[in-house]
Amino acid sequence: MRNNLLPIAKEGWSYVVGAVVAFMIFTFFDFTFLAFLAFLATLFFIFVFRNPEREYVVYQENSVVSPIDGTVVSIEELHNDEHKGYKVEIDTSYFNVALLRVPFTSTLEDIRVSKGARLSAYSSLSNSINENAELIFNDLKSSNKIRVVHKLKQSFKAIDIDIIKAQNLIQGGRYGLIINGITTLYLPENFRLNIGLGSELSASESLIGYFTNESKK
């Protein structure tokens, strides 16, 4: 995870530069309509890859903040063998900031990135074949952990993850980028939610909730 403090995310510079070069070429050859499209593309890429600084909000110990900007579209309580606790889905569109941020101070226990399709979320196949990244964040001191799954919808850009397994992470730090996707949080039983359906979240600033005690074994 490297510092990324420029106003445009590093993942977007090639797109912005490419659009600017195209604009200059089309303008030179007096291709007015194509130059106009290249200008719009430049504005689009600047907007999509914007990288605003966020105020560091100090919450109490064991807090979890949102890893992504977006809207809470689903909250489920799970009681199956695979997971007991809560499943929270956050929908992120092209209008949201795409940067991913660490939900709580932790170690990256595991990471798996699966390449795939980029179908609409309304497609019945999207859950099984769309590109996704699964990460497990673990606070080794308290054994509290959460699983985060980022899944693409229709997007021109693959998921970027800029951290590695066993890396120590600070809450709110940038760790990647996803443009137009669904982020799913799997939270343990010992978690107290601070959000509801329809909540608008900002990465690193919006409180998801708290671990209430040590994770249940």
Image: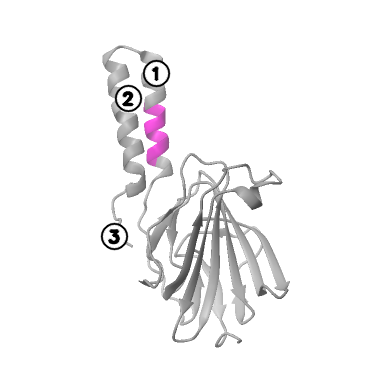
Which quadrant of the rendered structure holds the C terminus? bottom right
Which quadrant of the rendered structure holds the N terminus? bottom left
The residues tagged by marks 3 and 1 sit, at their Cα atoms, a distance apart of 36 Å
- The residue at the far top in this view is 30
The residues tagged by marks 3 and 2 sit, at their Cα atoms, a distance apart of 29 Å
Label 1 neighbourhood size at 10 Å, few (<14), some (14-19), many (20+)? some
Is 65 placed above or below 117 here? Answer: below
Label 2 neighbourhood size at 10 Å, few (<14), some (14-19), many (20+)? some
The numbered dot on residue 22 is: 2
In the picture, measured across the screen, residue 16 lies left or right of residue 84, that is left
Give the mark nearest the N terminus, 3 or 1.
3
Q: Do we see residue 33 in this rendering?
A: yes
Give percent across and percent down for residue 132: 54, 54
Residue of label 1: 34
Residue 89 sits in which quadrant? bottom right
Q: Amino acid at mark 1?
A: Leu
Q: Nearer the viewer, residue 116 or 48?
A: 116
- The residue at the far right in this view is 79
Residue of label 3: 3
Magenta stretch? 39-46
In the picture, measured across the screen, residue 217 lies left or right of residue 7, that is right
Q: Is residue 182 magenta?
A: no
Find out whether the residues at labels 1 and 2 contact each other: C-beta distance under 8 Å.
yes
Is 26 placed above or below 191 here? Answer: above
Q: Amino acid at mark 3?
A: Asn
Give the mark nearest the N terminus, 3 or 2.
3
